[in-house]
Amino acid sequence: MKFGTKAIHAGQEPDPSTGAIMTPIYQTSTYIQESPGKHKGFAYARGKNPTRVALEKCLAELENAKHGLCFSSGMGATDAVAKLLRPGDEVITGDDLYGGTYRMFTKIFSNYGIKFHFIDLKNPANIEKQINPNTKLLWIETPTNPTMQIIDIAACSKIAKRHKLIFAVDNTFASPYLQNPIDLGADLVMHSVTKYLGGHSDVVMGALCLNDDKLYEQLSFILNSCGANPGPMDSFLVLRGIKTLHVRMDRHCFNGRKVAEFLKDHPKVGKVYWPGFTDHPNHAVAKKQMRDFGGMISFTTKNPAVESTFKLASSFKVFSLAESLGGVESLINHPATMTHASIPKPDRERVGVVDSLLRLSVGIEDIEDLIGDLKQALG
Ligand SMILES: *Cc1c(COP(=O)(O)O)cnc(C)c1O
């Protein structure tokens, strides 16, 4: 089946008892047992819930993976992957990472004896220099947040395989519609389902997709033991959101291109970060591994003063100033003080997260209204 058909049907059967076409919200914490241990595959809802199981199957199919696992947030999913590690283990990851992931690695897991190397992954040859016998995990994000760097997934996978590292890709920005890391050799795909998959800014959820049975058993064990499971209502909302993922993504990509081109020509705008530009440093890699370039764009204004950027960020009428991304509505965000505030200033500035940087999540409104809003705000 092709993507749009999978988005609507994968993992979902009409309810056998009523014929309901939509997967019911199994709002239950427990399930009756005929005799101790004898049940229909469901014992307690932290471990398994039918609404969640339908969503996990759907996500797995969208990522061309064998298994899916849902968590109460993207960070919950990342936390489960980090819990595969032991004291003394080392992780190689990017120097332009979602702020929350950076915070979890540096403020939580480094206290448990795990060492993290934050390196420039634009050239995958840098990875091999950091590998030693303790290296266990390669964690990448592409496109990166917020500077839209593109990391070569297939090249990273070759290195990870050669050194027997677990290779995980945070695929939140692209969504499975634009990029399937497992097809390019990744062991694990992580999603903040909160973003494009949910798509309507009404759910916080995370997911992992993978092929390996043993790794799936380990991660299911961590999920059930540590309890970062999402509820059935949220699972339902995401199943419903995913039904329009392909249609929404087409419009995100169309609007994203128009907004990126508008910004590039604007006299008050400095740099524009969008992987669809032919002069983007890794445009060729983006073209190779992505089906289109998405709706995420960052840009700097020529005035470097933070006050001027704050004023601009508050002067939009259609774009809303808010954290998060990937919903139908357009959002604007100031990474340096919002999503990436937990990264030390010199570290964030080195990768381009300066005070005059703004990030747009271009929604699916009419493009004329979005461009009109940018025009009036930039003046
Ligand atoms: C939002 C986000 C996360 C964290 O996901 P939550 O659902 O907010 O916990 C991780 N990675 C990326 C790229 C994100 O944008």
Image (cartoon, grey):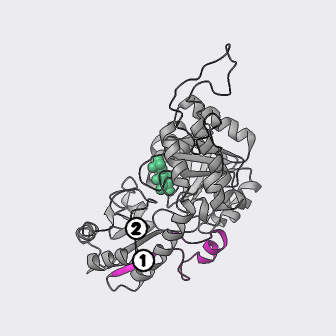
Magenta stretch: give its range: 269-294
The residue lying toward the viewer, choosing from 32 and 176, is: 32
Q: Residues within 10 Å of mark 2 (few under 14, many from 20)?
A: many
Disc 1 secondary structure class:
helix
In this orientation, does residue 111 appear? no
Please identify the quarter of the rendering in which residue 124 is found.
Answer: bottom right
Say whether residue 178 is left or right of residue 72: right
Name the image quarter holding the N terminus. Answer: bottom right
Q: Residue at x 57, y 38 (%)?
A: 51
Residue 159: give x, y in percent of width and height. 72, 59
As drawn, the residue found furthest toward the top would be 35
Q: Earlier in the sequence, mark 1 or mark 2?
A: 1
Query: Identity of the amino acid at label 1?
Result: Val
Give the answer, above or below, for where 331 lies relative to 20: below
Query: Identity of the amino acid at label 2?
Result: Leu
Q: Residues within 10 Å of mark 1 (few under 14, many from 20)?
A: many
Say whether residue 305 is left or right of residue 297: left
Residue 224: give x, y in percent of width and height. 59, 31
Say whether residue 109 is left or right of residue 307: right
Q: Is residue 289 magenta?
A: yes
Say whether residue 34 is left or right of residue 353: right
* Residue that numbered label 1 is attached to: 259
Give the answer, above or below, for where 83 lies relative to 316: above
Q: Residue at x 59, y 68 (%)?
A: 122
* Residue that numbered label 2 is attached to: 360
Q: CA distance from mark 1 to mark 2?
A: 9 Å
In this orientation, does residue 62 appear? yes
| Marker disc for residue 193 | none
- Whether residues under marks 1 and 2 lie with C-beta atoms below 8 angstroms apart, the answer is yes
Name the image quarter holding the C terminus. Answer: bottom left
Residue 281: give x, y in percent of width and height. 56, 77
